[in-house]
Image (cartoon, rainbow, N blue to C red):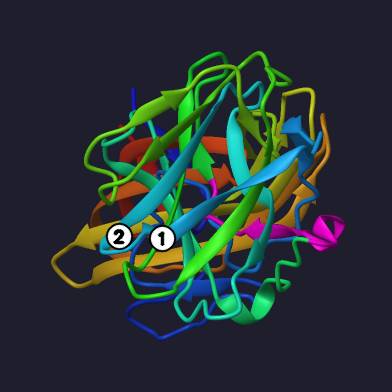
Amino acid sequence: MRKIIPIVIMGMLVSYGLGAAASIDTSTAASEQNNPSTAGSTYEDELDQSMTHYQGVISIGWYNPAEGYFFNSSVAQTFTPTKEVLTRIQFLMAKNATAAYPCSIAIRESLTGEELAYAQVGPSDFPLFDPLHPENLSWITFDINDIWVNPGQTYYMVLFTMNATDNYYYCAGNGTNMYPNGTVYISYDDGTTWEEIVDADGCFKTYGLRETFFEITQTPGLFGISMAIRNIGNVTAWDVQAGITITMNGIFSKINKTFTVTAGQLAPNESLPFTTGLIFGLGRIHIKIWALAVNVREIAVETDAFLFLFFIIIK
């Protein structure tokens, strides 16, 4: 027996042009994000991996060790995260007075593999290296796009810059194995081949977030579809996005709309309620309810139904 639900969905009357509630944004397509995003982020990330014991520096970029001999060096530091989301990286660095191009970082699963994340910082953000006062180095932040990583797996942070005359930077490090979960590699041919520097580590810090989880529940409502997104994990969810997408190609109405709601954070066991506005139409509909956050992988619930005026008939 079919179940008839006397509720109205999706905050809009396609035939009559009724709008959604003012607190709900609308768009024409559902979010399809697979990775966390940094746009408008409000989260408070945490220090994960680090090595901060300064002993000396290594150069990154153009170098002229002898007359007529030049090379462009790149440096990589491996690390093993314990948090599921990687948010930003810091290295203790300085620049040469003639550095003119940005210093870049790439996060990879291998030295020459695909870039999982990328960021660059211009020379104006670096202090000038002074060999008489090496303590003047600064922690330079590379604000990468937030990415999912696997705790316990080894990743590579690759530092490089443009191969241009006198364009180079300095990265602080230590010649002993101060960080047991990683090591340093150096390349003298723009990252084509690499050589491990045994028992050495760069001065770095990685930041991240722990993963949490959502549960979608439908709640009673007189008008529209009412739902709640609940954080069922043990840590706060950051930059929450949720919504309902409805599509219909009916005899009298055509619908292709998404209604979304956002929240800066959602603590463990807290819920984010969401109710759409009114809809009127006639035809088969497809409903998708979805939710995600910076540290929550996208989940979705989908169902087919029939919209008959102000009624939803669930098959």
134 up-or-down from 156: above or below: below
Q: Amino acid at mark 2?
A: Phe
Magenta stretch bounds = 132-146
Residue 151, image x, y percentages:
57, 18
- The foreground one among 145 and 49 is 49
Residue 116 within the magenta-colored segment of the rendering: no
Splitting the image into 4 quarters, where does residue 129 fall?
bottom right
Say which quadrant the N terminus sits in: top left
- The foreground one among 300 and 37 is 37
Say if residue 10 shows up in the picture: no
Say if residue 46 shows up in the picture: yes
Q: Earlier in the sequence, mark 2 or mark 1?
A: 1
Q: Is residue 102 left or right of residue 73?
A: right
Kindly identify the residue that appears in the image at 59 percent across and 39 percent down: 86
Residue bearing the label numbered 1: 63
Q: Residues within 10 Å of mark 1 (few under 14, many from 20)?
A: some
Kindly identify the residue that appears in the image at 50 percent across and 58 percent down: 8
- Residue positioned most to the bottom: 17
- The foreground one among 136 and 25 is 136
Disc assigned to residue 70: 2
